[in-house]
Structures are given as structure tokens and as C-alpha cells.
Image (cartoon, coloured by chain):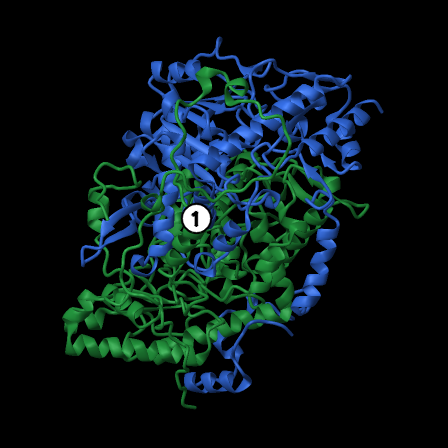
Chain colours: A blue, B green
Amino acid sequence: MADYLPHTREDVEGMLAFLGLGSLDDLFAHIPEAVRLSGGLDMPEGMSEPDVAAQFSRYTGANRAKASMMTCFAGGGAYDHEVPAVVKMLGARSEFVTAYTPYQPEVAQGVLQAIFEYQTMVSRLSGLPIPNASLYDAATALVEGLNMAHGATGRSKMLISAGVHPHWRAAAKTFARGTGHEVVEVALREGVTDWSSVDATGVAAVVAAYPNYLGVLEDMTVAEQLAHENQGLFIMGCDPVAAGVLKTAGQWGADIFVGEGQPFGTPLAFGGPYLGLFACTTEQIRRLPGRIVGETVDSNERRSFVTTLRAREQDIRREKATSNICSNQTLMAVTAAIQLGWLGTQGLREVAIRCAQGAHYLYAELMTVDGVSAVSNQPFFREFAIRLNRDASEVLSSMAHDGVLGGLSVSALCEGDDQSVPEEISKVMIVTVTERRTREEIDHYVDALRKAVSQ
Amino acid sequence: MTTRSQPGARAASAPLLGHATEPTIFEMSVPGRSAFQLRSTGVPPLSLEDLVPEHHRNGHAIDIAEVSERDLVGHFTRLSHRQFSVDLGMYPLGSCTMKYNPKFCDAVAADPGLNSVHPGAPAELTQGWLELLVSLEEKLCVITGMAEATLQPAAGAAGELTGLLLMRAYHSAQGDARRRVLIPDSAHGTNPASVTLGGYEVTTIPSTSEGLVDLVALKAALGPDVAGIMLTNPNTVGLFEEDILEIAESVHDVGGLLYYDGANLNAILGVVRPGDMGFDIVHMNLHKTFATPHGGGGPGAGPVAVSKRLVEFLPGPKATRLANGTFDWVRPARSIGRVHGWHGNAMVLARALSYIDVHGADGLERVAKHAVLNANWLRHRLRDTLPAAYDRTCMHECVLTATPLKTRFGVRGLDVAKALLEEGFHSPTVYFPLIVDEAMMFEPTETESVQTMEALAEAIERIAQRAIDDPQSLHRAPQTTPVSRVDEARAARHLIATEDAAQRMSL
């Protein structure tokens, strides 16, 4: 019998007596017998913490992909970046961890100000003036962006580059079942979106990724023109680390920026909780999804922060709300603000450059390996796609025996065939390098891959 | 028994220091200062010019802030001191289930054997994670009385929308286009917002004066174009919908489905199961019922469990136990697709499983019973100060009303809520549900002691006395908090969402 309940037997008896009841079951007497569960839940009795810990050590033991057993060269929106002790400890402060949504701003200035600082950083990274306080992840941020474009244009046609992460595109298609949006994917040719034959008439949004999920840095000019010449919105899905040195979404003329904020202080964590980054132009402010924190004053004219423009939100507008989001990813947003504060202006740039340096070094080495070739000859940033002489899943399995998580199988990521890689998709793999990978680790990667493709 | 409030029940010793404004990190920035330290890699240092073509490069560095590690720690520690939290004191926020978050569950999630695993790693390398997810899914299905579940939705609202898309997929598969979803007028705002995004229209069902769904109105609203109904049971005023079997039968009779909003699942763990009440789709808020920390507004997790006839439509891929005892990702036959970028908020899922395993069948039942006991004790204890909107046995929360204080002294629920902050308690949920005048919704949760609740009751009685003696002081409350009452209208009128906003004031 284990739990965290404070009541002694005497407490319970005294409380029941205060209520004029004889037993705890009397509290449920008004519930129809027909729906009452008899015999309790069909699951084991409670266990003490150390016993549960022993159970969990079985799970952790069976995860061979953990950092202590494998060096990570996988990315695709989830990156193995440095998270220093100072960020872990500040982000784990229980005042941030165990607070609720800041509905009472007088006792929530800590979270509110941290979100304000986060919003400022997102705005600067995106080059767009109106950020929000976070969404679930990049995939759902894109979905919110599409809904915003629908609201802004009254149209439903969404042109999405196949260079957008396959999971983001999949989520867009799932939610389109409810909104009725027409999601049109635009195929890639040698790693670059082929906008040439696209009919963008009546488009609500044109969506492109920067870099795209195969790592390629595409020129955003064509997509931007396609959107705006047809009075649609231009949405860019960006790698926020690369955004430390690349042109911002705002500079490319985007109306909406979405991105995956996991690289800023959140561990790989098997995919969540992550952080949906979102920012847009001032024109779209009344359609902003989720919460936004604004600066104001208190009754003594002291600077204060509060969630604002609340009239857009579901608890007030109900079926006419701009989004249904309530809980978001505040703790990850606060952590991102701390991590970015730790990196600072110089550190963000340094991390971005080091990722690119490692990726370019590895790419050059791999191009000398028989059985490995490039998917695209276009410029890339911190990850790239390679074509192998056998299935990527087999190569990954082989490399795992050498302690290397070699990348991501594109057909696994796409869950089948895809317009991003029309030919022999099962042989294509995405390889990622972060600032944490040493030359020694990269050289070992090359050896492991050489071995895998020569088997 | 006379209950005495216990020392330490009130968080009135915080904050530590005064009312000074904390500068923003940008105001603290000094050019040239830095905190970051990176690994020595030995990778050839190509220049940015060699790595990125010119037309992709930003002409200037993105300005973040430049602070030392010491200043970073000082800043965020001071911010944390300006923040109420469950760890600091009682947080009786109705409909939010702000129970104690066991530290053990956080420690479980911090294990590198879980949190250093890449979500895209092949299933053969992540067998532990897959087994964990399957175990959680199985236990959530036992708790709710359902067949299978998806763990992908990242929060309750995401679960709602997922559930509505499942409803749509089910009806479509029958070749049956339906138009409307019924929702009680007491429902949380996410319900109608989700219905719209699910492609349906909302039909609102009124509540009776007893706070329950009006069965006559419900039956009148039913028809062949009704896709389903979304219900919370116990409902948002904390009462159990006793006619639930009749409601279920009526909805099923017209071919509709029943959606269970799990916001209030804490009240019925091990006592009643949604599946046994006739529900077809159930979302759970793991950050409420299963004690995962709210993180200042998120992350949550909103798994959705379904009855047999909806299993084939569940989002995928889904962690699945194979016949040979290993685990793999499997896409359900007619899956609606992905509702999350990866597999859901995995760390939240791991925390919830550890919480469930510690409690087990017996502990979860005690959780529900003590939660209901606490809410009823508090309702009864406060009956002379803040009467209950519905004077009957409540479940895990009670909706009280400040109408008498408003009528007699001009003191509103909001004033009471703000004054409670000065007393060292978080305020209850105010003005929700919308159908109750001057609503103050208290959810003490099972982890607060009776002595702590007594201290809360005494604080409310002191505030009620202040309403008699000096009502003006309550309109000015709180004064002892880091900031006093915040001008929300001004924030909306002149939006300042970033440090760079033009209208920003200096410190």
C-alpha cells in the first residue's frame, strides 16, 4: 500500500462524522448501482517507489538507443544538443515545474516574465513581431498556421512542399479531416521543391521548410512569390538553430514562422514534450492561436506581465475560438529562454556554425565511401540525405552494433513511399551532426558505415 | 472532532523579498559577456562563408542577450521566487486537479535510459520505451473500461479533437455524414472549440436548476444528424450525472457516440468507469489525474481510449505488443493518421505510468475517495460563508458562490480570490462554469490534509469579515504579492508582446 495521501484513519473518521456519513462509500451513494465498478480495478496493487524503480530499470535497460550505448547522428527535428547543468537545474526549479497556467498574474510573474522573454527570443529568431507563448510541437504548430491562413483568406487550399518534415505533413492531413482543408503536396526534385508546375490559384497558404527535412537549403523566393501573388500566406517551417545564422523567416517575407523548439534545452526524450514555436505578422494578431503574454502595469504602476488578447481563446469564444489549445508547453518555453540566455548572442551562432562544420566534414568523408552517394547536390546546413547500396534499416541495424545511431531511415520517417524521395526511398538515410559530435566520433561513424555498406 | 489548522499550511512566508521589479534578461545584457561552454570537437573549422551560400546568410547575428552564468542563475531564481506553485502551497483551482506531484515520478523521467533516446530510433533499439507505452495504454484502458488507446495527443484539447476526428471517421466509414455534436452549457470552452475544428456544429444543452444535464432538452435535440455528445462526468459543476445510462441509451439510439471528457476522472478512479457508463471515446488529462506537473501551463498529455468499434481508426503508428513478446510500431487498419510530431509527450507518459504503478488498483481507488471526501468536507465547512451553488453531495470539486458577499457588501468572487493570494493560498477557479453567478470552484484534491483545508477555511472567513469591516480593502487586494492587481485591459489595448515592441516602457 503506497500513496501520497495525508489522511490518518482518525482524520477520515472525523471528516465523515462532520459530514454526517458513516463510510467513504456513502459519498458515492447517489451513483446508480448499475454503473458502479464492483471488485475494484483489474490491475496489480500499489508498489513502493523502489519497487517501481526496479520495474523501470527493465525498460531503461532495453533501450539500446540511449546515449550511454550509442552516439547519436539522428535528427529530423529532434537533436542531441548540449544542455548544461545550469539549464537543467534552473528548468527543474519546482516553482516553474509545479505551477499551473498563470491565471492569477499577481502570483505568477515568474512564469509570465519568462514567457515574455521567450516570446522576445522567438520574435528575433523568426524576424516576425508577434510570437505566442508556445504550442505542442512543430507538427501541431504547422496545423495552427494552416488554420490561421484559412481564417485570413477564407480559402482552404494548402500547398505544402514535400520538403516539410513527413510527420508535420501527416499531422496536417489528419487535422484536415476536420477542417476540410485541401492539402496538396508539392514534390521534390533532387532534394528541392519543384514549384514549377503548381497551380497556386486560390491558395490559402504555401508552406516550405528551411532547411528542408532532407537538409537542403532551398531558396525561399519562389515559394514566397507563389503565395503572395495569389493572395495567400507564406508559412516557413524553420530549424531554429540554423536560424542563428540564416536569413530569418521575416527576411524571406514569411507571414508565419513555425519550428521545433526542442533544440533549446529539451532532451531527446523519445519525442516529447517538445516545443512548438510560432510567430506571425501583426496583420494576423487577432487570429493568433494559444496564449500570448503582454506587458502592463499593476495598480501601483509597477511593470507587470499578464496573458492578454484573451478574447481569442477557447474559454471565452468557445466554438468561435481561433484554436482549441488550452494547455501548451510552457515549461519547455521557459527552458528554451534559459538555454538561449545561456547560449547568448555568440553561443547561438557558435552552435549553428559548429553543427554545419561537423555535417560538412562528415559529408565529405562519406562521399569517398563506395556504396554511398548524395541525394542532392544542393547546399545543406546541418543534416543531409545519402543514398545507400542497401536498405537504410539494415544499415542502421548494422551500425548499431558499433555503437552508432547512424541516422533516420527516410522510408520509416515517411511511413512508406513519399514525394520527397520518389525513387528507392528505402535506401535513403538522413544523417545529422550537432555541435556535440567530435571528429573522433565522426571518423568512427565513417568506419561503421563503410562496414555496413560492404556487408 | 475539532480540526485545527496546522502550522505551515499557508504559504504566507513567500515571497522572500519586497516588491522590486526584476529586470528582463535583455536589460541585464552586457556586450561581450557569455555563459556557454561547448565540447572540444577537433572538427575542421570551416568558416560560415564556406558553409553557407551568401544569399542564405543573415547579415547580422541574432541578438539574444549576453549574460554571465551567475547572472543567468540569479535572474531565473528571482523569477522563480515570484511564482506560486503546488510545491509552495495549496492550489485549490477547480477543474485543474492541482494535486501534489511526486518527486519520484520526475526522477523516473530524468533517467537517461529514457530521456536520451531519439524518437526516430528503430524499434529494435527502443524496446524498453515501447513496452512502457504499451503498459501505460493497457492500464489506462483498465481504468477507463475501454479497449485500446492512443497516447499521441499532447494535452486534453488535443485529445478532444482527436476524439472528434475518430467520431467523424467512424460515421464516415458507415457512409453516414452527421452534422451536430451536443455539449452541455456548463462545458469547458475547449469542447465547443474542438467541435468546430472537428468539422461539426455545436448544439448546446441547458442544465437543470440542480446542475445536471436537462434530459428533456437533450432528447429534444437528438436526431439522425447528431454525431455524438461530449460529456464530463462528474460534470463541470462537480456533480455526477445520475441519468447517464439513459443519456447513453438515447444517444446510441439515434446512432450517435458518447465522448467522455476526462477532466474530472480523478473523482471516479476505481469506482466508476466511463466504458461501463456507455462512453465510446474517452480522453484523459494525465497532468491532472495522474499527477504529472503542469509546468506553468504545460506540458500535459491527453491520451484517448476507445471502445472496440473505434479501435481500427486510432492514430498511428502505435506501440504494439507482438505475438513473440517483442514490441513494434503498428498502424491501425483505418487510422486517422498522426496527431503529434512523434509519439506524444513521452516523458509525461512515463511519469504517469510510474504514478499508476505506485498507487495500483487500491491506491487509485483511495485517491478518488479521498478527493471526494476533501471536496465535500470543504463544501460543508464553508457553507455559511460561501454557500454551494448546488446543495448536495459533490464529487472531487465543489462550486460555491460569492453572491451573498456581492449582494450585501459589494465584494465579488474575484476580490475574494485576490485576497486569498495574500493569505498564502492560490485562489480557486473564479467565474467558471459560466452558468453559476459569482462562481468559485474549489478542488482541494486528495493530497491536502484536513488541517490545511481548515487553514484555507479560516482564511476565507477572515476575508468575509473584511468584507463587513472594510470592503474597499478587498477591491485593492492583493498588496503583499510581488505585484498588485494587474491592469489586464491595458495589456490588451496596447499589446507589448516582446522587448522590441514600440510602446514598451523603460524600467
Q: Quadrant of residue B501?
A: top left
Identify the residue shown where x is 26% and y is 68%: B480
Seen in the picture, residue A201 relative to A5 is either above or below; the reply is: above
Residue B144 in view here: no
Instruction: Looking at the picture, tell me which residue is in the foreground, A454 or A190.
Output: A454
In-image side of B390 versus B153 (left or right): left
Q: Number of marks in the image?
A: 1
Instruction: Looking at the picture, tell me which residue is in the foreground, A392 or A72.
Output: A72
Assign a secondary structure to mark 1: helix
Percent from the top left, x then y, of residue A428?
A: 69, 22
Q: Quadrant of residue B124?
A: top right
Q: Quadrant of residue A2?
A: bottom right
Residue B366 in view here: yes
- Which residue type carries mark 1? Val
Outermost bottom residue: B1
Q: Quadrant of the N terminus of chain A?
A: bottom right
Percent from the top left, x then y, of residue A252?
A: 39, 21
In-image side of B427 versus B47 (left or right): left
Q: Quadrant of the C terminus of chain A?
A: top right
Q: Pointer 1: residues within 10 angstroms few (<14), some, or many (20+)?
A: many
Seen in the picture, residue B498 relative to B271 is either above or below; the reply is: above
Seen in the picture, residue A445 relative to B79 is either above or below; the reply is: above
Residue located beneath label 1 in the image: A334
Identify the residue shown where x is 68% and y is 54%: B135
Identify the residue shown where x is 62% and y is 38%: B316
Instruction: Looking at the picture, tell me which residue is in the foreground, A29 or B289.
Output: B289
Percent from the top left, x then y, of residue B160?
A: 47, 47
Seen in the picture, residue B178 relative to B348 is either above or below; the reply is: above
In-image side of B94 versus A59 (left or right): left
Outermost top residue: A197
Percent from the top left, x then y, of residue B276?
A: 58, 60
